[in-house]
C-alpha cells in the first residue's frame, strides 16, 4: 500500500496535512446500488473482495490508501464502459479523491 494512511475525520473538518480521510464503504456500496445498470456488488469468486469493519463486511468494495475497487455484476445489454463510467461518476463524492477501479465479476439477464 502506498500513500498516507486513512484516518477518521469529523464531518466538515479538513484532515491534518498529509492524511487522507476515510472512505465510507457503505456510502460507496449504496451509490453503486443506485446505478440502474448494476445488478449488484460481488465479493469475487472466493468472496475476498470486501471492506472489513468491526463485526461485518461490505462485500464488493475494497478501499486502499490511494484507490477504491468496486466489483459489480452488470445487467446484460449495456456497454461495460458505460457502466464503469456511471459507477465512477456516482461514487466520486464518496471516495475522498481516490481513483476508482470498476471490476466486472459477472453479467446477468435477471
Image: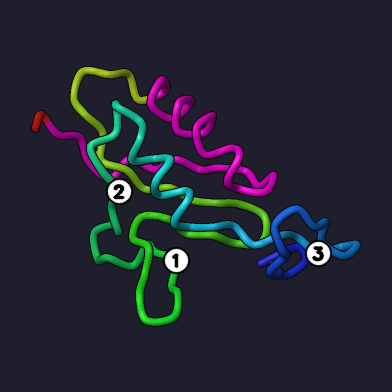
**In the rendering, at what x and y percent does residue 70 appear?**
43, 47
> Which residue corresponds to mark 3?
19
Tell me the residue at 23%/37% (across/down): 39
Q: Residues within 10 Å of mark 2 (few under 14, many from 20)?
A: many
- Judged left or right of residue 67, residue 16 is right
Looking at the image, which is closer to me, 21 or 46? 21
Q: Which mark is residue 7?
A: none
Tell me the element at label 1.
strand
Camera-side residue: 77 or 34? 34
Q: Residue 72 in the image: x percent, y percent?
A: 32, 43
Residue 94 as seen in the image, left or right of residue 21: left
Please tell me whether mark 3 sits on a helix, a strand or a loop. Answer: loop
- Percent from the top left, x then y, of residue 7? 71, 70
Q: Which residues are magenta?
A: 81-108
Residue at image point 47% right, 48% down: 28
Mark pair 3, 2: CA separation = 29 Å
- Which comes before the other along the chain, label 3 or label 2? 3
Q: Quadrant of residue 44 in the image?
A: bottom left
What label does residue 41 carry, if any? Answer: 2
Residue 39 is covered by the magenta coloring:
no
26 is higher (above) or lower (below) than 91? below
Query: According to the image, label 1 marks what residue?
Result: 51
Amino acid at each position: 500500500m502506498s500513500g498516507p494512511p486513512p484516518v477518521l475525520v469529523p464531518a466538515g473538518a479538513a484532515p491534518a496535512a498529509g492524511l487522507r480521510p476515510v472512505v465510507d464503504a457503505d456510502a460507496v456500496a449504496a451509490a453503486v446500488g443506485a446505478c440502474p445498470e448494476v445488478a449488484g456488488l460481488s465479493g469475487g469468486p472466493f468472496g475476498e473482495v470486501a471492506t472489513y469493519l468491526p463485526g461485518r463486511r461490505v462485500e464488493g468494495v475494497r478501499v486502499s490508501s490511494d484507490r477504491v475497487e468496486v466489483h459489480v455484476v452488470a445487467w446484460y445489454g449495456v456497454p461495460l464502459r458505460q457502466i464503469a463510467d456511471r459507477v465512477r461518476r456516482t461514487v466520486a463524492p464518496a471516495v475522498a479523491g481516490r481513483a476508482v477501479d470498476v471490476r466486472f465479476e459477472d453479467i446477468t439477464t435477471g
